[in-house]
Amino acid sequence: MRKYIITIILIMGILLSLSFEVKASNPSSYGIPYQTYTLNASNRLIPTQTAYMPVGNFGKELGLTTPEDIFYENNLIYIADTGNKRIVVSSLTGELIDIISFPEFMQPTGIFVKDELIYVADKQAKNVFIIDMLANEIVQTIEKPTSPIYGQKNDFVPIKVAVDSSDSIYIVGEGSTSGIIQLNYAGEFVGYLGINTVVLSLRRILYNIFVQDPDLASSLPASPTNIALGSKGSILTTNVNVNETFKRLNISGLNTLLPTTVYPTQTLSDIWMNHEDYIYLVSEAGDVYEYDSNGNMLFYFNTRDQALTQTLGLTSNAKGVITDHSGNLYILDRGYNAIHVYQRTVFVDLVHEAVTLYNDGKYLESKPIWEEIIRQNSSFALAHSALGAALMKEGEYDRALEEFYDARDYLGYSNAFWEIRNVAIQENLTIWALFIIGFFIFMKIGLRVFRKSMVYPKYEKVKKTIGDKKLVQELAFSMNTFKHPGDMFYGIKRAEKASYLSGLIVFLLFVAVYLINFYGTGFLFRSTNLNSVFVQLFTVIGVFMLYVIVNYLISTLNDGEGRFKDVFIATSYILVPYIIFTLPMTFLSHYLTYNESFIFEFYHQIIFGWTVILMIISIKGVHNYTFWETIKNILIIIFGMFILVLIGLLIYSFLGQLIEFVLSIIKEVIYRV
């Protein structure tokens, strides 16, 4: 009996220990109610070490009501307490330092502090107030600019404000589609900065053509939503309804972030750059992002309090973000009327030290730090890329190539491979030249010996026997695409020199070559969106058959002479140049770098152009059209393919909704029965 009791106690102890281990793996057990992420080599978010830990909050004692903006300067926090029509100044621990309020304040939504001056953007008053903190008075009121360049019909509704080192004033105006409003130190209008571009999508174009409502058909650019001051005279902005949801603008208004920057998709509410040149972003939904000055995403986490539990570190409606000189993070919460405080971790210090050294060009000094970061998180893409750059400086090109590959850093990979290839050419050029010459001589001599041997007549006999077979002749007939494409299409239609089988074989060869090229192209030139083989097969076969069917149907309506068989075979045969010439470049792409990318692109452009020309000739020859009838037919074919695809998508969407509706009825019947 005692043995059974001891056994039960041991089993319970093991189960309890396992349950404690499971709890320890959950971030919330450490008091952190969210998971922190970074980017991997595929630009997807992956879990990483906690970047910022919640350590407290304050604001109730300050009496905040729907605050809209926050600013940090000289160890003080300035808050635009919009609901109470005032500016609140507090310490980093939440102690009330000062309250600034004037009768002119109606709806202060933006704040900036510089040289004992407070700049307040008041949305309802439609003014920007400049306040002298020492004198505690408004020393200047900026109203709507009177300059004709500003536009008399343009409203002036300032919601955010920033001031640079030369006292130039930058204002975000609600509905200011021309960009940031720029004023000089005296408040005189200078111009606009950083206008957002408009992408004319098909939907927008159709709206512009058919919709009379100017609000729906408008192609006006989206206005910026927030602003912050960056380093070296740069201006940071947040934007909506554009791909570049935040920008780092230079004096010319151009976005200076890297082309590889992964932009947030959420609507951002605030942006901030600290004294270490790190960019912080926050959205109303609680998304918090940290980037370096070049636009590389370092960390992401979400603080949204979905269950409204008011857990430490979770927010209701985040409206502002700042950091102090110690690197601590502060998020202004309009929903809870509070400021949440987050302390950065040792891992963030490690990443910041490495990034700072790397951006300053000190690659070798940053190398051991990057190696430590990779040791702690092997999927940290930026660490692999930066380590590759450090290894390049040391001349370790093979290791650098591996790091760039792990980071999917294509430009770095190209530079490393160029160095490796250059060394290989210098060391082996003579051997390669001798091998090529020797191989050429061997083939010439071998061919002469073969022709004089006793085996050659048998070879010729077998060759003739195979060549006399009908299918082989039909396949060989496809080679006329290089010499006499017009005669080839005539032979397909009139002389029956090709069959369904030969056309199918050529098409299957095209599919095989397409898949080999798609998946087998060199790393630098391979598509980054590698779908499954079945998706590629469905796409290729679907587009081919769609073109053949629409081509045949249109030709029957436009007095075309080609049969379905003729259209199918001719369309297959025009793919012969692609089949023959694509694979050599697929092989060569493994030895090219971005310095020779024009060769790769121009080569494929020639093949594509060649195929298009053969397609035009095939339509003209198979259907016996004139030149202008051919052009007309091509345009109708393209339109017909578009319509069929559109109908297919509508049917697919309708069937999906129908199936979902039927399933819901079945579930309801089962539940009630």
Image: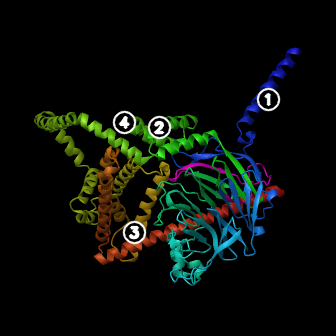
Q: Which residue is mark 3?
A: 551
Q: Please give the label number shown on residue 16.
A: 1
Side (left or right) of 140 relative to 165: right
Residue positioned 47% across, 42% down in the render: 386
Residue at the front extreme?
135
Q: Position of residue 307 (x, y in %)?
A: 78, 53
> Disc 4 on helix, strand or loop?
loop
Q: Secondary structure at mark 3?
A: helix
The C terminus is located in which quarter?
Answer: bottom right
Determine which residue is flagged by label 4: 395
C-alpha gap between disc 1 and disc 3: 71 Å
Judged left or right of residue 12, residue 367 is: left
Q: Badge 4 local density, few (<14 within 10 Å), some, or many (20+)?
A: some
- Spatial separation of the CA atoms under disc 2 and disc 4: 15 Å
Circle 2 is placed at which residue position? Answer: 365
Earlier along the polypeptide chain: callout 3 or callout 2?
A: 2
- Measure the C-alpha gap from mark 1 to mark 2: 47 Å
- Which mark is first along the chain, 4 or 3? 4
Disc number lying in front (3 or 4): 4
The image shows residue 431 at horizontal and vertical percentages of 21, 33
Residue mark closest to the camera, 2 vs 4: 2
